[in-house]
Image (tube, rainbow, N blue to C red):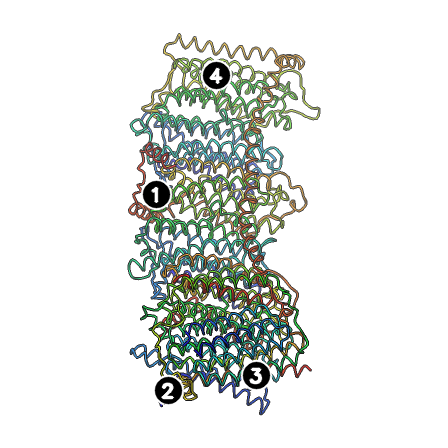
Amino acid sequence: MSLPEISWIAIVPEIVLSVGAAAVLLVEVQWKPAPRVLGAIAAGSVVAAIASSVIQWLLAGDAREFERLGELIKFSGLIVMDGLAVFGRIALLAVTGFGLLAGWRYIEGLGRRAAEATALILVATAGFSIMVAANNLVMTFLGLEVGSISLYVLAGMSRERARSDEAAIKYFLLGSFASAIFIYGVALIYAGTGEFEVIAIQSYLDGFVLFSPGVILIGLGLVIVGLGFKVSAAPFHSWAPDVYQGAPAGVVGYMAAVAKVAGFVAIVRILLTGAGALEADWTPIVAAIAALSMLLGSVLALVQSDVRRMLAYSGVAHAGFIMTGVVGASTESVLFYLAIYSLQLLGAFAVVAAVSGADNAESDLDAYRGLARRSPLLAGSFAVLLLGMAGLPVTSGFVAKFGVFSDAWSGGHEWLVIVAVVASVIAFAFYLRIIVVMYMQESDATTVVVPGTIRWVLAAAVVTTIIWGVLPGSLLDLAADALPL
Amino acid sequence: MVDPGWYMGLAAALFLIGAFGLLLRRNALIMFMCIELMLNAVNLTLISAGRALNDINGQVAVFFILVVAAAEVVVGLAIIVSIFRTRSTASVDDLSEMRG
Amino acid sequence: MMIDFLWVVIALPLAGALFLHLFGRFVGEPRAGWLASAAVGGSFAVAVVAALPFLAGSSHGETVVLWEWMPAIGANMEILWDPLSALMTLVVTGVGTLIHVFAIGYMHGDERFHRFFTYLNLFAASMLTLVLAGNYAMLFLGWELVGLCSYLLVGFWFTKAAPPPAAKKAFVVNRVGDFGFMVGLMIVFTTFGTLSYSGIFERAPQELTGGLATAIGLLFLVGAAGKSAQIPLYVWLPDAMEGPTPVSALIHAATMVTAGVYLISRSAAIFELSTAAQVTVATVGAATALWAATIALAQRDIKKVLAYSTISQLGYMFLAVGTTAYVAGIFHLMTHAFFKALLFLGAGSVIHAMSDTQDMHKMGGLLKRMPVTAWTMAIATLAISGIPPLAGFWSKDEILASAFARGGWFSALWVVGLVTALITAFYMTRQWVMVFLGEPRWDDDTEPHESPRVMTLPLAALAGLTVVGGLVNTPLRTTLEHFLEPAFEGVRLAHPPEGLAMFVLLAGLSVLAGLAGAGVAFLTYRQPREGWAGFERGFQPLWGTWEEAYRVDDIYGRLVVAPGRLMADIAALADSKVIDGAVNGVARAVRRLGDLARPVQSGFVRNYGALLLGGAVAVVIWMVSGS
Amino acid sequence: MIEALLFVAMGLVALAGAVTVVAARNPIYSAMGLLATLFSVAVIYVTQLAHLVAAVQVIVYAGAVLTLFLFVIMLIGVDKEERREESLPHQRLIVGVVAGAIVLLAAGLTLFGDFDWVPAAAPATLPDVTNGTIEAVAVPLFTDWVLAFEATALLLTVAAAGAIALAHYRRRES
Amino acid sequence: MLTWLILLPVVGACVVGLLPRQRRELQLPLGIALSVLPLALAGYVFFVFEPVPGYQFTEHHVWYEPWGIAWSLGVDGISMPMVALTTVLVPIALAASTAITDRTKEFVVNTLLLEAGMIGVFLSLDLFLFFVFFEAILIPMYFIIGIWGSERRVYAALKFFIYTAFGSALMLAGIIALAVTHGEQTGAVSFAISDLMTLELGQSAERWLFAAFALAFAIKVPLFPVHTWLPDAHTEAPTAGSVLLAGVLLKLGTYGLLRFNLSLFPEASVDAVWIMAILAVIGIVYGAAVAIVQRDLKRLVAYSSVSHLGFIVLGTFALTSGSLQGAVIQNVNHGLTTGGLFLIVGMIYERRHTKLIAELGGLQKSMPMLAGFFLFMTFASIGLPGLNGFVGEFLVLIGSFTTLPVPTIVAASGVILAAIYLLWAYERVFTGLPETEENRLLPDLSAREVSLLAPLAALVLVLGLYPNVLLDKIAPSTEALLDHVVASTDYQVPVPGRLGDVFVAGGDEG
């Protein structure tokens, strides 16, 4: 009987996060400390996880350089430590760090339940972190579920808001449904190929000639649906607006961003690597989903009067844009887009959290009236982030859009690019609407109190939005190196 | 022996019944049960495929799905209970305040 | 040699204008006027000196480039100094100086006195640019600038109701002419690749086809008709009388309006190639002469009479240049400048005296009150009536004789000219008699008085010119023709018929016409009011039509302005409703789409589930249908 | 032959149970239907030689999960019978259309599609390795799949922490 | 050097942005002072600029190698006048903004950023970089209109943004297509204009790309029938916004047509000559016709822009040396005159708080100096020779006639209409006696205002009388552009003296 293959370095970040989560829970039980202590523990574990991930990045780079790619397959093929995984992981950890900062006022406000919230966030990140690294589809499913279930709970944790319940149950029911569809797809792929591992599926598909791929195609389709749900691509997006609106403002940004990052990394891995041979089969579907997402998201965002719903629909549109990159079969542009978009999304929701205030009030557009006069910096940051999401030049959003567009174009999907540019123009309208409300309307409401933690998030989001808009090379190089095995 | 296709066909039927149940029932509890049905169908598919493929991994995967199902049930029921406490309803149709 | 300094001719009044524009307010009332007069007078002096070589016959004209302007189309700032431009320069500066001086008296007390002289000086500079230009682009520069000055000066009294629209009308109608002129220039450029006179005229005989020459000629005629108030574009000139009278004298009688004649004369080399163009020009001229003369017959406003008379006289000049009797045309241009300026200034003097009344029915018997004005105007009236030996006789007669000599269709035009001469004599005499003779009809509070010397002296000077001006070109001594000949090198000039007998015959006829007209008018209007009023009634309804100037303004209003306005309104409506409506419609449609899609997000989780499953099934179907 | 009989019998029971879950008015009946399905599927597992999984199915699902369901059903009231008429606009229509599409898809695949559930190359005879004994399952579970096994720890942590978090708040409130 | 030209305004914006909020009185003066720096630098560039074809002062820094994008700058005879115009107008626009007392700092910052963007557009030699600037300037302009505009500012700002963004979005697709094609043909993706000019595009691809670019620029110009954003934007924008909008932003469209459509898609350009010419001519006549009946003075001037810009497009596509030179210089001319007109309308608005012609009247009595400047700019706009408007218009008309006789004749009628709408407006606003008390007591221009208008007026005069200061530098570049078009197509520039051929050819085409 062979001993299990253990590769500690491959799972250090997850271990650190899990230990952090456990520590938070235990410390809380034992000492009931001030929330600050819990925050410190969480922050420490995130930082440590990032540090270890950086080491993983270097190792992955080395392995690629010296062509020892086989070494990156860990735990008998359950997970891999390739550039894609580590890039995704670092993005997730960054999102987590900023997400904790952005939501800290909310978490503190939970009182004794702060520990659970913090622990859930850490564990959710660990789960998604497994998901991005998973090579085995069952592993993907496990990571997905760990993360998703945590998010269901986070969505329902709000103290004051009845809508939180609604968000939680909707998210939970639809999420479970989508998970079931996803795992059924995995099962069908297994039935068709006899493999759970992406790499193995890839070599199977590359090699087969005899067997009709019907069951594999159905399986793949269901997997796309399941993951499409997680990244809120149309027509699997319907949970997103309600959940974004109902869930506590403090953690919505985190919830939205991690799910997108992990979901897209999984999509990239499964579609581009595993099912690369079936590209001709899945490309039209993904392209259709992308087009539908962009148009539907943009058009629906246009008619919203709640900022969170608007951001949710804009998220649908962004899912479409990223899908466009997937159609273009480019990890580089997808990852770049993911990285900058998740930061912008976090920043935007940090603003929402700040405006909603500690009492987690509604996020109606009216609440933003005259914000530029009341809190110029907050409004300015929001404006930059919105323009970034809109994809205007000098922001990273433009570079990201440009990347996915040109990849899709060179992939021969010209029509999709045309749809995308039209959709992005429609999208301008609603981003600008928020700016209109903030800058061009007046209100006698009072200044918004912006907690220091949110300031940090905003600073980071704004600075990266502009830096990577002007000098995208640094991040693009990293994204270009983040190749799947 | 019975062709694995039959087993999988049965699984597919169960999956679809579960899926349609989810769409047709408004009681959150029953909707959960439908999800359990769907997961069971997945398990059946895996077992049958594993047998047909002469591969033990199918059975191993089932274990994990069982665990996921259990965890989902725990959290899901917690959510239902907490909603029921405040609203005295288990009908998801009543939870439709957010729309558009 | 001299030509290198010729820019001074333009620069002097320009500098005057600039100086007065900036510092006029500090210069004060009379001084500003003297300064301006001195500037134009200086130009005159320079021009005289510079023109001496032509008299001596030692020069045929030369060109000097001042600086490059639009080299791509061969348009530079260049001065052409030849006898034609020299003569024009002398007329402009000479008459201009006198009018400047007159204006010092006339504009006395106006609060924008210095501004008036700014504009006058600017006008002088512009007009000189026009006549000194060495290419069509620069001519066009002057052409438009005089239009600008006309606009500024007609609208000088901007607080009154009438002048601003009149100014605008003048400019816009001129623009219509300019449009034709510009198209003509486009053809010229396309044909020759340059707009420079020297390049064009030398090559025209070889490179220009008859058809193109006709096209260019007719288009130039459109431009000239605008500037020189010929049919059908003359309507602005009567309105332009809203400007101060010195302006009418300078711009709308002596100089600017003759620019069209100058243009055609300058382009003689092109017209030379197209008989059709010549005939058209001559016909337009003759028709305008008669048409305007009839209108002038019945006018009551002293300046309106002169305005229509100017149009009519310009018609003569067109007739002349159309007949290719360029020298005669230019000659008449010059003499007309003298006597018409004199008439206008005289009218100004009268208006001044009558406290701004212009209605001749309210005048009468002014001879005693203002003798200088009266007698000088009498000279001018006789001159325009073609009574020898005054200037008008010589020039008009040369035109008519040339037309007669050309024969054919031109003979018919000669008849028209002759009839016009009769009418001209009639209405001019009518005017003089109505104003200066008969019983006083003025309002009680008016105290007519002779104008100050600063006004009467220019009158006298002009009267002198009117008397002797014609002698520069008589059948006996064709000094002017010799002088101008170098400017029309290569052009076949039309001449009056040879021989003294023919001259006597033709001159006799026209003098007879003039005397007849003048005599009838004198006898009619010497009577008291009832007498001539009855005479006028006798011609009803014709007289009424004339008095209303054939209601041409009305017709234009209905045929051109109203439809144009309607089109603009329709365009504006279409712009906001159709074109912009489509834009906003698209925006609304997108929003509408959003509203339509909203119900899909119904809020019911089971609907979402159905959407999810439906999407999944669609994906699966699509997936397998591909394989 | 026995396998075929068992498949038919248990398959029918499973389907009946599933339909009961969906169709029953009373949640208790639904739970019982689910129980029937779980049991019959467990039997099918046995015929597929997945003994351990079958046992776990009965113990975990039928034992623990269903009990939990029943517990909650009791907690929120058994007597609440659900009205059966559809309250949502278009829901049944959509479901009908989707179902129709699935039927068409299935029919199309069976009749015209070049479709098979498993690779035709699959071996016909079954060696012991798929014999789902405890050992046969446990060896891969604790070697190749060890990380997944560990990951389930996270899942359980989430479940526990989540349940506490949700319940905790209600306690404070009441 | 050129990098600094772009960076100086950005630095200026940062400096102003960092001013403490309390030092309100410093913000605008400092902004003006800082905006003079780029002017000085541009002046240096202008005087050192050699009148030869090709780009000068070029700079090239790789931006992101794998994408083939570069920070690539240069200036030639076509862009140099535009840069100069921009740097001239910005200080004036800023100095004209003393009426802006609310959020002055933000205003100055936005204006300076706008300047950087505009200069960037003109200097970019890399399509990607160009697009970045082209699109980026929408943002500050959007804020300028939306925050400091008048009543319907939000509508106007949104319309401006979305409309122009729509056009440029399709152009983005076109840019990507070009770069990808370059990658396919040479193996290396490149966005450099010089590289892309050598591409072998198929006929249909070239036409599509031409259309994508042309649409973007046509909206910007704006060409009939995609012009309707302009009256709204112009009317609602604050004075400085209108000045820069009319003065520079519209020129991005005409500049783009010259720089990109002609040089990248010469074949398609030659094929599209008639379409573009007809649209331009419709714009000329139609814009003028609509302008005649406008009730709002600013709107009237806005529509006059539609009309005037038509001349530039006509000149661009007439493809003769005269018309191209005319198009380029007319860019500058229109910027100066219309900028001046907007300044003056703004000054009226500041005093009288209305732009409606009906509420004004007799203003020459109370404000003779203002009236004088208005009339001056009006005549420059009408195309009075001796002033700058004429030079461009005349060059365009004379030059265009050779190749496009009929459209040019129709276009020439625009000079009549221009006289009608502008002089009629002048008549209604300035002449007569002021009827209301408000109109009677308006103060005339202050020394500050005169100092804003005087430089413009001086430039108008200088360019009118001695346009060679610009034409000298423009001509080599337009000639090179024309040579490029001739070399890459079977188009021949007509030789003078062959008018008969032109008419025949024109007749066939039309």
Kindly indicate whether the residues beneath marks 1 and 2 are on one polypeptide chain.
Answer: no
Q: Is residue C114 visible?
A: no
Three-letter amino acid code at the position of disc 1: Ser
Say which element carries label 4.
loop
In the rendered image, residue C257, in percent from the top left (x then y), is placed at: 48, 28
Q: Which residue is mark 2?
A: A5
Within the image, what quadrant is residue A217 found in? bottom left
Q: Which residue is mark 1?
A: E321
Q: Nearer the viewer, mark 3 or mark 1?
A: 3
Q: Nearer the viewer, mark 1 or mark 4?
A: 1
The 10 Å Cα crowd at callout 2, few under 14, some 14 to 19, many 20 or more, is some
Q: Nearer the viewer, mark 4 or mark 2?
A: 2
Compared with residue E173, is residue E62 higher up or lower down, i.e. above or below?
A: below
Three-letter amino acid code at the position of disc 2: Glu
In the rendered image, residue A16, in percent from the top left (x then y), is placed at: 46, 85
In the rendered image, residue A233, in percent from the top left (x then y), is placed at: 49, 66
Q: CA distance from mark 1 to mark 4?
A: 54 Å
Say if mark 1 contacts mark 4, CB within 8 Å: no
The 10 Å Cα crowd at callout 1, few under 14, some 14 to 19, many 20 or more, is many
Three-letter amino acid code at the position of disc 4: Leu
Say if mark 3 contacts mark 1, CB within 8 Å: no
Q: Is residue B83 visible?
A: yes
Image quadrant in which the C terminus of chain D is located: bottom right
- First in sequence, mark 3 or 2: give its number: 2
Q: CA distance from mark 3 to mark 2?
A: 33 Å
Q: CA distance from mark 4 to mark 2?
A: 128 Å
Q: Nearer the viewer, residue A137 or E449?
A: A137
Compared with residue C504, is residue A163 higher up or lower down, i.e. above or below?
A: below
- Residue A72's disc is none
Q: Which residue is mark 3?
A: A116
Q: Which residue is mark 4?
A: C390
> Which chain hosts label 4?
C
